[in-house]
Amino acid sequence: MDFKFEKRRTGKDKERRNRELYGNHSAKHVRIQEHCQENHLKNIQAERSKNSKDEKTDKGKKKK
């Protein structure tokens, strides 16, 4: 049974791992940044698709 024993993760271990991965930011801060980045990319894609639709409708109209 001793060979299956894994050392219990303490708060210090989690803190050290997060600091190595993300620097001085907390895990919550990193999640918020990732969520904002995803929303930003979605907004850019929506804007591009809207602009492409506008261009298609402009081509169909006659210019005076």
Image (cartoon, rainbow, N blue to C red):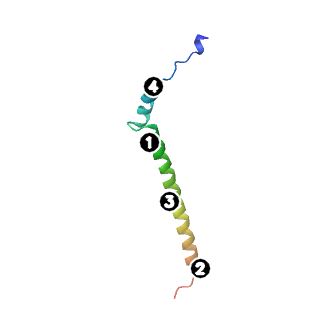
Residue type marked 1:
His
Where is residue 52 drawn, in percent x and y?
55, 68
Residue drawn at x 47%, y 45% as measured from the top left: 32
Residue drawn at x 48%, y 50% as measured from the top left: 37
Helix, strand or loop status at disc 4: helix
Helix, strand or loop status at disc 1: helix
Q: Earlier in the sequence, mark 4 or mark 1?
A: 4
* Distance of label 1 from label 2 (alpha carbons): 47 Å
Residue drawn at x 52%, y 20% as measured from the top left: 8
Neighbourhood count class around disc 4 (C-alpha, 10 Å): few under 14, some 14–19, many 20 upward: few
52 horizontally vs 33: left or right: right
Numbered mark located on residue 60 in the image = 2
Quadrant showing the N terminus: top right
Helix, strand or loop status at disc 2: helix
Neighbourhood count class around disc 2 (C-alpha, 10 Å): few under 14, some 14–19, many 20 upward: few
Q: Earlier in the sequence, mark 2 or mark 3?
A: 3
Residue type marked 2:
Gly
